[in-house]
Every structure is written in structure tokens, then in C-alpha cells.
Image (cartoon, helix red, strand yellow):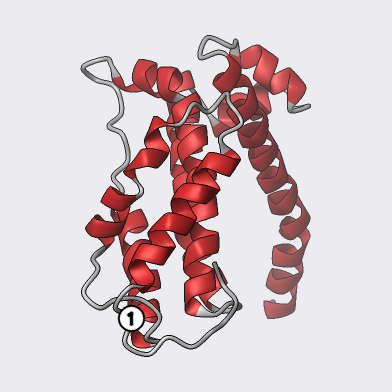
Amino acid sequence: MGEHKDASRGAETPQRADAQRNRERILAVAVTELTRSADTPLSVIAKKACVGQGTFYRNFPSREALVMEIYRHELRQVAESADQLLGTREPDRALREWMDRLARFGMTKAGLADAIRQATSSPDGPAKPGHDSLLQATDRLLRACEEAGVIRPGVSADDLILALGGLWQLDPTSDWQPRAARLFDLVMDGLRVGAPGRKETGAR
């Protein structure tokens, strides 16, 4: 009986994997299309994601549900990438590369601003997700850098997000990457001032 249960579980795995791929494909297409126009019909998104209407609405029963899941998905990816980078990079390099990922999230959020505003504007509409996971990820990166002696002590997650505030002034439709990179390098230089025991890692 146990073997039959295991076999059933194994048989379901390809279906779950296919469903997950469908969901991720819908999200990827939706980011592109809703950034271009907040009024993009859901039928267009479903068609470009190569899924049927039934599959689409099982995943996202409304425009509001789709927009909020995009926001949560992008936010979650940025937050989770902090630990991935810390596991494979020196702490200051991990922090600097994480800033690039934060920038991509910020530009996606800016591009989706109209869609998010529409989704959350009605009285009974969904609330915009909080940023606790983002602040926690920022704090883990800063603490790792502080323990390694590569940044000045005492910098909080709120301090860093405030210092990166210029990012939100960039036009997501412009060539924003070089300007963002310059801002992040300046912030990293500032963080290194007063670092108690920096070891040269070649990071910027």
C-alpha cells in the first residue's frame, strides 16, 4: 500500500511541475505586458503565455490577483537572493550584487505603478504587500558585511534603503542601469569608510 502511495505521488510530480511552469510563464509575460500598459487585457497575457483561459483563471481569478502576485513574486525573489549571494560571494560583493537585483525590482515596480495603483485603489481591493522580507534581507547582508569588517559598524537596513533612495528617481524607460551602478558604487564607498578591518576582495 505504501508503494502504491509513493507511485501515485511520483505520478503527480510532472503535473505539478507543468502547473508551476505555466504559472511562472504567466507571471513573466504579465510583467512585460502590464509594464507596457496597465490596461493590457488578461486574454492577451494568457495568449502570449501560451495557456488557455481556464488555466489562466485557475491561477489568477482576477486582474488584482495577478498584479499583486507579480509584486509578491518579484519582492520574494529579491529577498531570497540575499542568502543565495551570501552563500557564494564575499559579503561586500554579495551586498553590491544584491543592489543590482534590488534595482531590477525597483524598475519593475515603477513600470507596474499604474497597474498596482488600479489593483489597490478600490475600498475592498487587496492591500499592497509589506516590505518586511526586503528589510530582513538587507539586514542579513549588512550584518554579514559588518562581521567581516568590510563596512562601518552600526548601519541599519533603514539607513541603507534611505541611502539608495535615488534609485526611485530613475526613469524605468531610460538607460537607467549605468546611473544606478554609479549610485550603488558611491554608496558602497561610503559604507566602507570607517570599516575596522577590511580585507581587499576586489569588490566594488
Q: SS class of the residue under badge 1?
A: loop
- Residue in view at x 59 percent, y 11 percent: 40
Asked whether residue 76 appears in the rendered view, the answer is no
Q: Position of residue 155 (x, y in %)?
A: 24, 68
Viewer-side residue, 202 vs 114: 202
Asked whether residue 105 appears in the rendered view, the answer is yes
Quadrant for the C terminus in the image: bottom right
Quadrant for the N terminus in the image: bottom right
- Residue in view at x 49 percent, y 26 percent: 171
Residue denoted by label 1: 195
Q: Position of residue 63 (x, y in %)?
A: 48, 20
Q: Is residue 122 above or below residue 134?
A: above
- Residue in view at x 36 percent, y 55 percent: 134
- The quadrant in which residue 160 appears is bottom left
Viewer-side residue, 95 vs 77: 95
Viewer-side residue, 34 vs 96: 96
Q: Is residue 147 left or right of residue 109?
A: left
Q: How many dots with numbers?
A: 1
Amino acid at the residue labelled 1:
Ala
Q: Is residue 137 left or right of residue 86?
A: left
Q: Position of residue 174 (x, y in %)?
A: 58, 26
- The quadrant in which residue 109 appears is top left
Q: Is residue 89 left or right of residue 68?
A: right
